Image (spheres, helix red, strand yellow):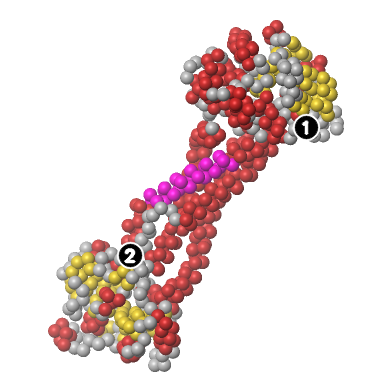
């Protein structure tokens, strides 16, 4: 078992990935690291390889070369099912929008990752109480737990998504432009709430955005172009 | 929680899911209904006669003899002479023998001439005897005992007069010699319910003035003269026989079948019934095949519905994947979804069928003489319902595998 305080949350070394197909999109990332508890803003325009990078870190796809370590675990050495399990246990994911199953209740949406992560469920303890606490901390109206998630505003849905990412305190939160669907005022409020919760759980945050103005609130800001080179080379 | 999410997803698509479930329900109701009718008809036929070891008639086919003598379906091609009847009755193997004479009718019901022994020898549904609901048996020459359906359909009670028509569906009545309803039999669920039973001599009596199918011209013979006449029949239609020992059935049957003076046929009712099933079985198989095709059609409809939903649900799949669900979970979700729809359809279909049966049962009984039992579904029906659900799971594998491949390719990065 790697020492949690020493091992970085994410470490990529000498990674090369090539999408299958004749005109394969390639991504090359010599080195990238997110330390434990660190909050990193990754700046990049769409099409700059951020989706591929996030898919690599989340274990959806596997690098053709090099190593991707999440919480010290080498994803390349694990099978597909084990990578899915690792994602559920270690990573909370927040999308840009449409994060939730609209027909399911808020509580079911928030508890969804626990269904695939027994250890994280153990960490969460009383899941129902956790859900209530997270909803309250994220400024959601009391009693939202049983309502269908589809009824809420975009801003509220994003906060429900944060609660889902944070439940069971996974070591890493991956957020893909979570504020782009919010207006400026809501963005600040959203980030404040997110950062408060991160301090409580001690999770690292890797957030992708194209908005450089957010940089002030992060420990470190990285230009995507500085860590990866993408190309469209014939295989 | 997973089942709750699946149900929630189905509820969110209530209209398409509802129509799919309805299609499955109707097909299941048809599928089960055919099976129920088949079993009901078989049980009803098999329950019609018991305790009779042999049926004897003029030589024809065994199924034909069974049908006209017991079920009143079709007609005898020839009669059995009284001499032959008496010779058979005199055989030492014969325990009892009941003659029956068919050929006349009253309204839409057949008239059967027989002896009072019929009422104690005829047994149905595993040895049950006929019972009178009201009145008494055949005592006078012009007494008639009517079946429950005859009484109910025509509104007859004891004491009512009955005029027998000559032949079946004819316009010539034996109006000069009316019968009187002496008794009404309790409901049996057999063709007896639709039969007017009179004495064997009465059949002779009403044909005194008839010769080779036509009424002799001139004034009819008065009833008091007829009562003095010798009314021993010259021929009967068939005879029901009980033997002394079951071991002797085949010996007696062979003796009758090789009877030198007249071509006769003796059949074992159970064996003839088996032959009948072999004939009917082909039609039954065709019916079951057609109703199974209807179920398959409904399941293909469900498959198409799941396929077309995949496009709009790619986002949903991506969420599942991001939360750590493996592609096989996605596959499982869709299969369980299909199983839930099929189970719902099967349950509703079963309820539709049983509800419909409860309403239509008296009508089916009155029209076809088939009394369908309304018990809990038996093992075979449950097996059929299980097969429908299993087939649904199998059918859903195709769209589920497509979803599996889509979610592998999309990962968690689908955009809409």
What label sits on residue B189 in the rendered view?
Answer: 2
Please tell me which residue is depicted at 51% across the width and 63% down the height of the picture.
Answer: B285
> Pointer 2: residues within 10 angstroms few (<14), some, or many (20+)?
many
Q: Is residue B109 among the parts visible in the rendering?
A: no
A18 relative to B102, above or below: above
Q: Position of residue B84 (x, y in %)?
A: 34, 89
Could you tell whether B416 is left or right of A148 in the image? Answer: right
Spatial CA span between label 1 and label 2: 74 Å
SS of the residue under disc 2: loop
Disc on res. A77? 1
Q: Is residue A86 above or below residue A138?
A: below
Q: Magenta stretch?
A: B335-356
Please report, as a chain letter, where disc 1 is located. Answer: A
The quadrant the C terminus of chain B occupies is top right
Residue shown at the point (33%, 70%) measured from the top left: B127
Quarter residue A122 falls in: top right
Main secondary structure of the magenta stretch: helix
In the rendered image, is residue A181 in sight?
yes
Residue depicted at 71% across the width and 31% down the height: A83
Where is B139 relative to B260, above or below?
Answer: above
Examine the image and state in which quarter residue A194 appears.
top right
**Marks 1, 2: nearer the viewer:** 1
């Amino acid at each position: 078992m790697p020492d949690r305080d020493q091992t970085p949350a994410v470490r990529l070394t000498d990674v090369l990935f090539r999408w299958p197909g004749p005109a394969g999109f390639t991504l090359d990332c010599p080195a990238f690291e997110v330390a434990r508890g660190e909050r990193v803003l990754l700046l990049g325009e769409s099409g700059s390889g951020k989706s591929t990078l996030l898919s690599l870190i989340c274990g959806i796809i596997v690098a053709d070369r090099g190593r991707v370590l999440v919480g010290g675990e080498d994803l390349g050495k694990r099978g597909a099912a084990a990578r899915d399990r690792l994602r559920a246990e270690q990573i909370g994911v927040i999308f840009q929008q449409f994060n939730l199953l609209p027909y399911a209740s808020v509580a079911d949406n928030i508890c969804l990752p626990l269904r695939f992560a027994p250890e994280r469920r153990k960490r969460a303890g009383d899941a129902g109480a956790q859900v209530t606490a997270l909803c309250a901390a994220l400024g959601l109206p009391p009693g939202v737990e049983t309502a269908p998630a589809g009824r809420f505003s975009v801003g509220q849905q994003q906060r429900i998504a944060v609660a889902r990412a944070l439940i069971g305190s996974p070591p890493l939160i991956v957020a893909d432009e979570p504020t782009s669907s919010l207006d400026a005022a809501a963005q600040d409020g959203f980030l404040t709430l997110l950062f408060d919760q991160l301090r409580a759980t001690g999770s690292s945050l890797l957030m992708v955005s194209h908005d450089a103005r957010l940089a002030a609130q992060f420990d470190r800001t990285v230009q995507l172009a500085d860590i990866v080179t993408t190309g469209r080379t014939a295989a | 929680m997973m089942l709750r999410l699946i149900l929630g997803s189905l509820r969110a698509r209530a209209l398409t899911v509802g129509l799919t479930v309805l299609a499955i329900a109707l097909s299941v109701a048809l599928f089960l209904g055919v099976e129920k009718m088949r079993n009901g008809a078989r049980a009803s036929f098999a329950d019609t006669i018991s305790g009779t070891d042999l049926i004897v008639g003029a030589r024809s086919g065994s199924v034909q003899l069974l049908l006209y003598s017991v079920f009143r379906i079709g007609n005898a091609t020839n009669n059995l002479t009284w001499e032959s009847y008496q010779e058979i009755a005199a055989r030492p193997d014969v325990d009892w023998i009941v003659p029956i004479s068919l050929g006349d009718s009253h309204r839409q019901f057949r008239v059967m001439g027989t002896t009072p022994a019929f009422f104690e020898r005829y047994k149905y549904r595993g040895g049950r005897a006929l019972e009178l609901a009201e009145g008494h048996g055949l005592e006078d020459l012009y007494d008639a005992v009517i079946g429950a359906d005859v009484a109910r359909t025509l509104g007859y009670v004891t004491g009512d007069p009955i005029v027998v028509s000559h032949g079946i569906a004819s316009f010539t009545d034996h109006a000069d010699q009316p019968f009187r309803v002496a008794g009404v039999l309790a409901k049996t669920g057999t063709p007896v319910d639709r039969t007017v039973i009179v004495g064997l001599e009465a059949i002779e009596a009403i044909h005194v003035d008839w010769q080779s199918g036509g009424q002799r011209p001139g004034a009819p013979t008065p009833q008091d003269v007829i009562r003095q006449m010798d009314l021993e029949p010259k021929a009967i239609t068939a005879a029901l026989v009980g033997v002394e020992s079951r071991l002797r059935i085949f010996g007696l049957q062979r003796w009758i079948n090789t009877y030198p003076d007249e071509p006769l046929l003796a059949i074992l009712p159970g064996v003839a019934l088996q032959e009948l099933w072999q004939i009917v079985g082909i039609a039954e198989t065709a019916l079951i095949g057609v109703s199974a095709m209807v179920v398959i059609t409904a399941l293909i409809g469900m498959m198409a519905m799941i396929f077309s939903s995949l496009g709009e649900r790619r986002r949903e799949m991506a969420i599942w994947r991001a939360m750590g669900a493996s592609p096989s979970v996605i596959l499982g979700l869709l299969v369980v979804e299909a199983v839930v729809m099929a189970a719902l359809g099967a349950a509703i279909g079963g309820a539709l069928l049983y509800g419909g049966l409860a309403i239509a049962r008296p009508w089916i009984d009155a029209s076809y003489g088939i009394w369908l039992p309304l018990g809990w579904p038996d093992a075979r029906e449950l097996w059929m319902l299980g097969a429908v659900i299993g087939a649904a799971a199998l059918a859903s594998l195709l769209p589920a595998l497509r979803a599996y491949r889509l979610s592998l390719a999309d990962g968690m990065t689908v955009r809409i």
